[in-house]
Image: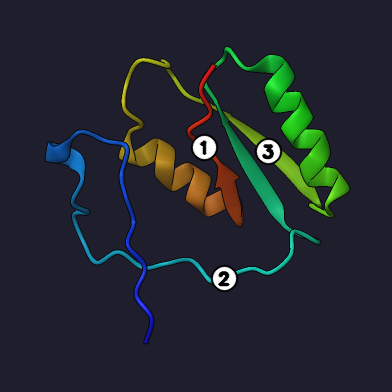
């Protein structure tokens, strides 16, 4: 079985998952997928361009998730909400 190494952008004290990490099923296409964009509130034009491109590639829907404060780490609840509502998400966009 192949393994995947996941790097966290969080500080070292937050890098290890609290439970067993389970990878999402691999998708080979965006057709019909609901895709999320995590928005820090400062990337309006970039977010719109990414959304248009995702829809052009066949995504059924693009949902935006606004981080509460762009300077804070994402909470477990925020990440759980994203995971529960989309097949995949575009994150880590800087401005």
Q: Position of residue 48 (x, y in %)?
A: 76, 25
Q: Position of residue 95 (x, y in %)?
A: 54, 16
Describe residue 14's horizontal placement relative to residue 70 as left or right.
left
Q: CA distance from mark 1 to mark 2?
A: 17 Å
Q: Position of residue 47 (x, y in %)?
A: 69, 26
Q: Which residue is mark 3?
A: 63
Q: Residues within 10 Å of mark 3 (few under 14, many from 20)?
A: some
Q: Which residue is mark 2?
A: 26
Label 1 secondary element:
loop
Dot label at residue 91 = 1
Front residue of 15/68: it is 15
How is the structure coloured here?
Answer: rainbow
In this view, 45 is above or below 17: above
Describe residue 38's horizontal placement relative to residue 14 as left or right.
right
Quarter where residue 23 is shown: bottom left
Q: Are the residues at dot 1 and dot 2 in contact (C-beta closer than 8 Å)?
A: no
- What residue is rendered at 64% in x and 68% in y? 27
Front residue of 33/54: it is 54
- What residue is rendered at 73% in x and 58% in y? 33
User: Of tags 2 and 3, which is closer to the observer?
Assistant: 2
Mark before the other along the chain sequence, 2 or 3:
2
Q: CA distance from mark 2 to mark 3?
A: 20 Å
Label 3 secondary element:
strand
Mark before the other along the chain sequence, 1 or 2:
2
Q: Are the residues at dot 3 and dot 1 in contact (C-beta closer than 8 Å)?
A: no
User: Of tags 3 and 1, which is closer to the observer?
Assistant: 1
Q: Are the residues at dot 2 and dot 3 in contact (C-beta closer than 8 Å)?
A: no
């Amino acid at each position: 079985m192949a393994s995947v190494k996941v790097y966290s952008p969080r500080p070292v004290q937050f890098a290890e998952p609290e439970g067993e990490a389970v990878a999402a099923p691999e998708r080979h296409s965006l057709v019909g997928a609901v895709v999320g964009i995590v928005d820090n509130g400062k990337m309006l034009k970039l977010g719109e361009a990414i959304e248009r491109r995702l829809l052009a590639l066949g995504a059924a829907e693009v949902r935006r998730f606004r981080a509460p404060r762009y300077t804070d780490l994402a909470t477990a609840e925020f990440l759980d909400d994203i995971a529960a509502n989309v097949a995949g998400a575009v994150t880590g966009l800087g401005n």
